[in-house]
Amino acid sequence: MFKKILIANRGEIAIRVARACRELGICPVGIFSSADEYSRHLRHMDEAYLVGDPPPQESYLNIQAIMAAAEEAGVDAIHPGYGFLAENPRFAEACEASGIVFIGPSSKALALVGDKVASRSTVKKVGVPIIPGMQIAEREMTSFKKIAEQVGYPVIVKASMGGGGKGMRIVRTEKELEASIEAGKREAKSAFGDETVYLEKYIERPRHIEFQILRDKHGNTLHLFERECSIQRRHQKIVEETPSTVLDAELRQRMGEAAKKVIEASEYTNAGTVEFLLDESRNFYFLEVNARVQVEHPITEMVTGVDLVRHQIMIAAGSKIDLKQSSVEQRGHAIEARIYAEDPENNFLPCPGKILFLNEPDGPGVRVDSGIYQGWDVPPYYDPILSKLIVWAENRDMAIKRMSNALNNYVILGIKTNLGYLKRIMGTAKFIAGDYHTHFIDDNASELRMADDNIQAAIAAASLIAMGRKEGEKALIQSGDIRRSTTPWQEIGDWEICKR
């Protein structure tokens, strides 16, 4: 087993990996940019190394600086988390060249599945259905236009490397194509260090279903069932659940076996996720492989009892998976809500700033994977995810109620967040019925929007309460029943700091 692992990431995922390291008796080593000098994840590391200035290209995407930190720390392995360099084959190659284990697939497998275009070609050869689109990476605008004409509009522009909705653009007419491709390239370059994008047919109103896979170096492969990820804003998931309400046992089994076939054909090892789109006729199509641990991995852990990050580390160390497909079961229902520093009323614009007050929920079946603390300045340079709220219950109805209650008890003051928006999602009829798809947010915009009259009513109510409190306090002060508002220091009498 490894003695030291460098965690090439930040925030809640860096903390999650550090905790898994400690349970295995491994020393976690962290990295940080100059903007993250006081980040919470550094508190969970035995050592930490500055790798550059705030922009991702100069720090968390800086392979040379990260490898220098790894070598200085003398680590055995590197865990990339998700995002940043997690799916970058050049990073895996750098690890291999340095004799440091990359906790993920080999650079060869990563180059195949991490390249969404190349993986589509491989998947097609093993008989798994794919969405019509590009089979090879193209750079000329004429090639993009030709493919778009062949498959028919609408099409979707996607980053060839990475995921998380970065670089995605829906294009409904040829007039929009060139600008969308250029914008997608810029965003992909910023997020993943690679500007390559590709086109595929855009399927209207699909369900987004992904299967969690584990495969060790001894050829053992199993899936840990599905996650429903259809509730998305700007092509990025914000609520996930498992099991999916749309799958029956037969379809679940077919999709699970298809996912395993994709992983085996790619000679992929470690944890990964095979993503599918499910159309309204219940036909499924391969979407992509996410060659890393997913943001939403906790809900799989909650319903299966399998620690995915621990298995990532053990597989990388050469251990065999100690599970059989027949022994893995889904138990109960789990939901995850992603908490972002953003303004849902202003097109989900990121809202960095200082957290003035924080209260995180707890209780039976409630888990919070958090990268924040009260008094911390949320930086403007990175994805605005703050934390993840995960709940588990015996059934879906109870899980929804538990999530709603937990969201009611989650308080973050000082910055705008999507907490209220998530509460409203939990209360929509379509979500409660499990009848939704990837256009859920657009289709339910009016129900999810905070009504202006509610805002005005809240302001008026707060003003009246404040006025009433002041008048009441004034009357009590005049009557001598209470003193003016004081601090504990004022109430203990005269005091001073003395030197001894």
Image (cartoon, helix red, strand yellow):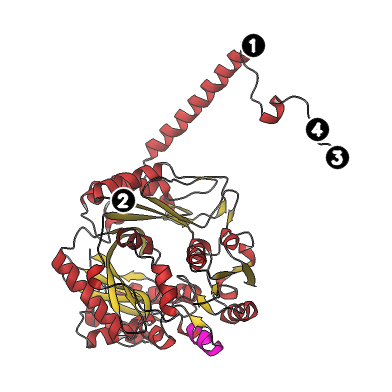
Prevailing secondary structure of the magenta residues: helix
**Mark 3 or 1, nearer chain start:** 1
Residue depth check, mark 4 versus mark 1: number of the one nearer the observer? 4
**Mark 2 or 1, nearer chain start:** 2
In the displayed structure, does residue 280 sit left or right of residue 58?
A: left
Q: Position of residue 246 (x, y in %)?
A: 19, 60
The residue indicated by pointer 1 is 480
Q: Which residues are magenta?
A: 91-98
Please tell me whether mark 3 sits on a helix, a strand or a loop.
Answer: loop
Mark 2 Cα within 10 Å, few/some/many (few <14, many 20+)?
Answer: few
The residue indicated by pointer 3 is 499
Please tell me whether mark 4 sits on a helix, a strand or a loop.
Answer: loop
Between residues 452 and 444, which one lies in front from this camera angle? 444
Residue depth check, mark 3 versus mark 2: number of the one nearer the observer? 3
Please tell me whether mark 2 sits on a helix, a strand or a loop.
Answer: helix
Q: Position of residue 489 (x, y in %)?
A: 70, 30
Residue depth check, mark 3 versus mark 1: number of the one nearer the observer? 3
The residue indicated by pointer 4 is 496
Amino acid at dot 2? Ala
Amino acid at dot 3? Lys
Q: Residue 233: tell me if it is visible.
A: no
Measure how far apart labels 2 and 4 are at the Cα level: 58 Å
The residue indicated by pointer 2 is 445
Q: Position of residue 358 (x, y in %)?
A: 52, 45
Between residues 17 and 456, which one lies in front from this camera angle? 17
Mark 4 Cα within 10 Å, few/some/many (few <14, many 20+)?
Answer: few
**Figure quadrant of residue 335:** bottom left
Q: Does the magenta run of residues contain 239?
A: no
**Figure quadrant of residue 471:** top right
**Figure quadrant of residue 277:** bottom left
Q: Does residue 488 sit above or below 392 in this rendering?
A: above
Q: Position of residue 180 (x, y in %)?
A: 38, 73
